[in-house]
Image (tube, helix red, strand yellow):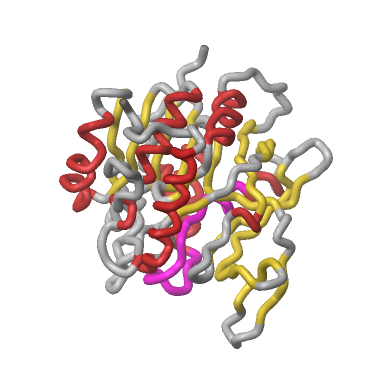
Amino acid sequence: MKKTTLAVMAAGIGSRFGGGIKQLEAVGPSGEIIIDYSIHDAMEAGFDKVVFIIRKDLEKDFREVIGNRMESRIETAYAFQELDDLPAGFQRPEGRTKPWGTGQAILCCRELIKEPFAVINADDYYGKEAFVKVHDYLTQEHAQEGRMEFCMAGFLLGNTLSENGGVTRGICSVDGKNHLTRVTETKNIIKTENGAAIQMEDGSRKPVDEHSPVSMNMWGLTPDIFPVLAEGFPDFLAGLPDRTKGEYLIPTIIDELIREKRANVTVLESGDKWFGVTYKEDKPAVIRSFRELIEVGVYKERLFD
């Protein structure tokens, strides 16, 4: 069977969380963090290796909280996403504090990953089903149509909303072959009494179908993506009107590849309910959710015992 890697994006500064390193917050009964459950599910599905994408200043804390423990269970490597890691001719703009986005995060792994790989956010819980489906896709042969062959775990929008504020989701359009035809990065989606809506800057709300498939940044990719990311990053930087803002986002990049007919992206539907720590107020609900999963036998009290 093909070797497969899990890349975990954990370099975000977590500004909405309100202080602290949200990716390292304990949510399980024995001190487990969300990444523990993701890696557990990935290993169970058959992934052989994990690459943590972090900031260099997080390395000590990250290794102490999870990295050192994982190194005894699965092949482990680290990639560092830094604001100064820019193509020739570009410099970090004064005032920029936010990482350059998920596209740059994945690009940071280009020297570490030579096999099919999945990408996830560190602070999102995806459920077991998605890991199994993405792993199975990555280890299968796919018809060659002169395009890159990727996949994406698709979740129902209504299963991915926070009770405590707006979230950003990639809203997807899918054709009859379960191929992604468009992904639109949409900010500030909130839960409402009637389902979901986009909270507009002027205070109004634009309803959105809560049954829409969305991307939660769980992608199944191949190393073919790295040259694409490397080629596109300078163009992205050159086109930014304000380099203190703006992010090089993988959903936007994938959308361009689809429209240019350079990639097929198969959407693998998951019925699992997402949860994560987007806001500090989300944490108690996440703790309750893991407790409920333990009570019904999905996980052990001590995850890795």
Residue at (47% x, 56% y) in the render? 248
Quarter of the figure with residue 221: top right
Asked if residue 275 can be seen in this view, the reply is yes
Residue at (35% x, 32% y) in the render? 303
- Give the x, y percent position of residue 4: 46, 24
User: Depth check: 301 or 48 in front?
Assistant: 301
Quarter of the figure with residue 5: top left
Kindly give the residue lying farthest to the front in the view shown.
295
Is the stretch drawn in magenta largely helix, strand or loop?
loop
- Give the x, y percent position of residue 225: 52, 37
Kindly give the residue lying farthest to the bottom in the view shown.
202
- Number of numbered callouts drawn: 0
**Magenta stretch: residue 240 in it?**
yes
Kindly give the residue lying farthest to the right in the view shown.
176
Does 271 sit left or right of 80 as displayed?
right
- Is 240 drawn above or below residue 286 in the view shown? below
User: Depth check: 165 or 135 in front?
Assistant: 165
- Give the x, y percent position of residue 59: 20, 45
- Give the x, y percent position of residue 184: 65, 59
The magenta stretch is 239-254
Residue at (40% x, 38% y) in the render? 37
Residue at (43% x, 52% y) in the render? 288
Does 172 sit left or right of 50 as displayed?
right
Does 165 sit left or right of 204 as displayed?
left
